[in-house]
Structure formats: structure tokens, C-alpha cells
Image: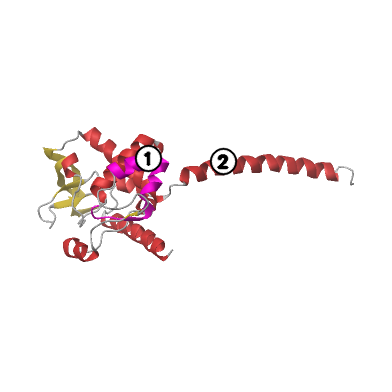
Amino acid sequence: MKKLILSLFAALMFCGQAQAAGGGVAWDKFPTERANDMAALQNGAKLFANYCLNCHAAAFMRYNRLRDIGLTEDQISANLIFTGTKVGDTMQTALSPKDAKAWFGAQPPDLTLIARSRSAAGQGSGADYLYTYLRTYYRDETKATGWNNLAFPNVGMPHVLWELQGQQRAIYADEKDPHDAAKTLHVFKGFEAITPGTMSTAEYNHAVADLVAFLHWMSEPNRADRVRLGVWVLIFLSIFTVIAWRLNAAFWKDIK
């Protein structure tokens, strides 16, 4: 339980710091229909195993739980496990804390609960943030990794999906502050492609949506069952309320 609390705290801090660093950048809306699409979840699991598990763990999710998104244990073992890990084990990373500290300055956060983090001030959900974050990397040679991020400026994590998306640079322009003519604002105008990736822009956006859908599902695998059960509970309570109301009227009808 202590580890679970620490994992959630790390996820909240990760997104909270990104929001603070981002200076209020508008987050794109995550396509929520992907969250219930089995094919999208399966593709997201593949992307997670290939690109995220190298550095990030999901220590509170077992591989065999992926049966809930339509994968068999044979498929999980053959396509998502690349070490001697058993299908019943949790999704751990081989990156040691010592190496993580040396390479990145800190240990990458556990991602089991990252999508449950939510921004302040109604900016959007954790899924909205992740969807924006993974699509707004750009080249910045002033950074140690060579990368920066619009949603999380000065991010320490390099762009692990760059081969899929390609490389882009951020275009900024200096404009006068409409509230203070003496000030000049450095305003983001858009991205300019440097080199293409193996995917088109639309394909990459779909891939990121699938990955975020998987992270969203992983943060609460029972969510769909909970919502479905909640609907039936509300229906039962509504019917029971009507029955109780009529029984009460019947018990008291002869009392004046």
C-alpha cells in the first residue's frame, strides 16, 4: 500500500510540475473513444512495452492482467515480454536507480497511475496532458538530450518516439504584450518539420492516442466494470425508491 501511495504521488507530481512549467499551454483533447477500443488498447500495450518499459516501470500491473484487453498469455509472452520475466510478474524495468540517476538526473516515475493525475484550474485530465505531451516534443540543441517539450518545458526525458513522429522545431515570434506595451512576449506559433518519421502525422496521433488509452486503462483496469455496476445500482435504487414511496403511502393511508 505504501508503494502504491508513493506511485500515485509521483504521478501527481510529474503532471503537476509539467503544468506549472508549461505556463498554461492549452492541452489537446484526448480522443476518449479510444479508451474503450480493444484494438487501440492492444496497440497501446505494444507501444508501452517497446518504448516505455525500457526506463519506466508499471510496478502495480501484472502482465497477465492484459488478458482483460483481449490478449492471451501466449500473445503476451511472445510479443510484450523481452526478458526472462514470467507472465504473472509485474511490469518492471531493467533500468537500475543508479543508472537512471546518472543518465537522467532522477529515476523515471512509475507509470501505473500516471493517467489518473489531473491538472489544476480545469486545464484537462491526465489523459489530455499525456496526449499533448507525447506530441509536442521538438529539437532544442541547448538541452542536454537535444529535446524540449511544449507541454513540459525543460523536460529531462528525451523523445523516445522520435523515429515514429520524425523531428520538428518550434517556431516562436516576439510580440508586444497587449496588457503592457513595454513588455515583449515570446509566443509559440507552431511546429516546422525537420525530418519525417516512419508514420504520417495522422498515424502518429492515432498511435499516441492508443498509448495514452492503454495508460488510462492501466491506471484503473476495473473502471468499465465499476461504471457498469454503478448504472445498475442507480437503476435499482430508483426502482426501490418508487416501491418504498408507494409502500409508505399504503401503510399510512388509513391514519388521519
* Residue 178 showing in the rendered view: no
Q: Position of residue 95 (x, y in %)?
A: 23, 59
Q: Which of the labelled discs sits on residue 101, or is there none?
A: none
Q: Is residue 99 left or right of residue 70?
A: left
**Residue type pointed to by label 2:** Val
Q: Nearer the viewer, mark 2 or mark 1?
A: 1
Q: Position of residue 21 (x, y in %)?
A: 26, 57
**Residue type pointed to by label 1:** Thr
Label located before the other in sequence (2 or 1): 1
Up the image or down, 250 lies above or below 219; here it is above
Between 172 and 159, the one lying in front of the other is 159
Between 119 and 195, the one lying in front of the other is 195
Q: Is residue 49 left or right of residue 141?
A: right
Picture quarter containing residue 55? bottom left
* Residue highlighted by disc 1: 72
Tally of numbered discs: 2
* Residue 44 showing in the rendered view: yes
Q: Which of the labelled discs sits on residue 231, or is there none?
A: 2
Element marked by disc 2: helix
Q: Residues within 10 Å of mark 1 (few under 14, many from 20)?
A: some
Q: Position of residue 130 (x, y in %)?
A: 31, 48
Q: Position of residue 7 (x, y in %)?
A: 36, 60
Alpha carbons under labels 2 and 1: distance apart: 29 Å
Magenta residues span 54-78
Residue 206 within the magenta-colored segment of the rendering:
no
Element marked by disc 1: loop
Residue located at (86% from left, 42% from top): 253
Residue located at (23% from left, 47% from top): 51
Name the image quarter holding the N terminus: bottom left
Between 243 and 50, the one lying in front of the other is 50
Picture quarter containing residue 202? top left
Q: Residues within 10 Å of mark 2 (few under 14, many from 20)?
A: few
